[in-house]
Amino acid sequence: MRSIVVVGGGISGLAAAYCIRKYARDNGDDINVILVERERRLGGKILTENTNGFIIEGGPDSVISTKENFLEFCKEIGIDKSIAFQKPGSSGASIFINGGIKDLPKGMSIGVPTKIAPMAKSSIISPLGKARAFLEIAIPRGKDGNESVKAFIKRRFGSEVYYKIAEPLVSGIAAGDPKFTSLRQVFPTLAEMEDAHRSLILAARRNRKIANGNGTGTQSPFITFGNGMQELVHALIGYIGKKNIMTSKAITQVTAEGKGSGKKYVIEFDKGKRIRATAIVFATPAFVTADLLSGFDGISGILRKIPYVSLATVSLAYKNKDIKGSIKGSGFLIPHIENRQMNAVTWSSLKWDNRAPQESLLLRSYFNNSYSIDKPLPNSSQLINIAREELRAMAGISAAPLLEIAYIWHKGMPQYTTNHSTIIKEVDKWASDNPGIFMTGAWRNGTGVPSCISSAITEAKKAIDYVNTSD
Ligand SMILES: Cc1cc2nc3c(=O)[nH]c(=O)nc-3n(C[C@H](O)[C@H](O)[C@H](O)COP(=O)(O)OP(=O)(O)OC[C@H]3O[C@@H](n4cnc5c(N)ncnc54)[C@H](O)[C@@H]3O)c2cc1C
């Protein structure tokens, strides 16, 4: 029987296995799919916990709904009715700067200010910094097609806007040091705005006109689900079927045996067990796939070129009456120049309905080691203490929390550095020379959940074509 093994039960592996099962069902085909996950739990970075009436996310808490036909995918898997939009009035973010939390100027677009009047009124940037930022309208297009995010924003808006406003936003989104982050890979919209309109301020003005003309543009594109991100995972597990899923099984090595149409992949588990498959889809982090494919020439070294940053989130809950300071908007960001350990805070229960019982506040704070990638993050209890101390110092929250929980993701986020597209070309070349092995995951075509799903489906379709033509 033709079979495809999918390695890794995060959203990428679940989406790949779903696509193969759907193809088999829709076409009455007997392709067998087996999803193998190392942990007991499926979902990988998607981890939702329901505790004492709180819905706590350890990994992603929302997705950009406008990406990769994500809404259509939700409909296809039957969870569109559960989609939850950001609460009205919770869209404004703030920034911790010079000892206080200040509102970001209105009109920010992916980390850069695109409206002159709100910027002119903002007290975050000095008069000189504002004058430099407004010169953006006259700055010519860049010539470096492989620019980093930091170089791009400093070139267009100047240093002050970069360090005080843009850096915490872009480094938060990419969870990486913007000095190395590829503009075109991670923020293609900014690059496209410059390509098409030269100035980002002018581009945003023109785009706003179009959005206003359509009557769109006010609703935040971020969405989640009524019971949290786990709904996505549960729906996919339901479709794939438990009999096609193996959990608590770590794959240790993959080898090939036979040639031509008789070629099979041998998948070995930690306790010496093996299974054979016609094709294999890796949906594991790049460094894990590198280890599993170490028996094949050439690929491990390519995959290991992708650096990974560690991340952590600390969720804390309080009684509303214990919160003294002003808590509004979606949260606040902390620029690197403030020399704090925490990167950002989201007021989760202000941003999303149903996250906390009445009269209480759920928040989560973020940490990463993107500026010192070789230094591990503190452990859970240290992170909780740091988060509590930083919240006391920055937001005046000193009460004892009702709940405290940390999630640490060691090497949890791939970095799309300025040589990423070259690495992916090398991966593609290797894959075309080694038919039957397919690779996907957050390192392939974007780290966001919609991008992981779309990349996994692309690779799963290639695997289906391969098994159909290799008989
Ligand atoms: C803290 C945090 C916040 C985030 N926030 C957002 C957000 O708000 N919105 C958004 O869109 N994205 C967000 N992301 C990014 C997004 O969650 C991830 O990129 C995505 O979930 C990765 O999915 P994946 O399936 O590619 O990898 P993973 O989720 O890492 O899954 C890989 C799986 O492979 C398994 N595995 C590893 N080794 C083996 C082995 N040897 N054998 C078998 N199985 C193995 C692992 O156990 C794991 O389950 C966030 C990520 C983090 C860490």
Image (spheres, rainbow, N blue to C red):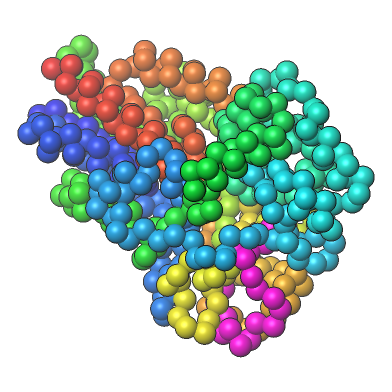
Q: Which residues are magenta?
A: 315-335
205 relative to 101, above or below:
above
- Residue 330 located within the stretch drawn in magenta: yes
Q: Is residue 350 visible?
A: yes
Judged from this view, the residue extending furthest toward the front is 213
Does 4 sit left or right of 86 as displayed? left
Residue, x 19% and y 23% (percent of image)?
467
Does 125 sit left or right of 308 as displayed? right
Residue, x 23% and y 20% (percent of image)?
466
Instruction: Please tell me which residue lies in front, 266 or 232.
Output: 232
- Residue 78 located within the stretch drawn in magenta: no
Judged from this view, the residue extending furthest toward the right is 128
Instruction: Please tell me which residue lies in front, 189 or 291.
Output: 189
Residue, x 49% and y 36% (percent of image)?
446
Q: In x, y percent, where is residue 66?
A: 44, 43
Q: In x, y percent, where is residue 102?
A: 76, 63
Q: Locate the C terminus and report the quarter of the image it occupies.
A: top left
Judged from this view, the residue extending furthest toward the bottom is 321
367 relative to 110, above or below:
below
281 relative to 234, above or below:
above
179 relative to 73, above or below:
above
Label total for image: 0
Q: In x, y percent, where is residue 119?
A: 78, 50
- The answer to which quarter of the image holds residue 331 is bottom right
Residue, x 31% and y 44% (percent of image)?
73
Instruction: Please tell me which residue lies in front, 69 or 24.
Output: 69
Does 134 sit left or right of 228 as displayed? right
Q: In x, y percent, where is residue 183?
A: 64, 31
Q: Is residue 380 visible?
A: no
Q: Locate the N terminus and report the quarter of the image it occupies.
A: top left
- The answer to which quarter of the image holds residue 92 is bottom right
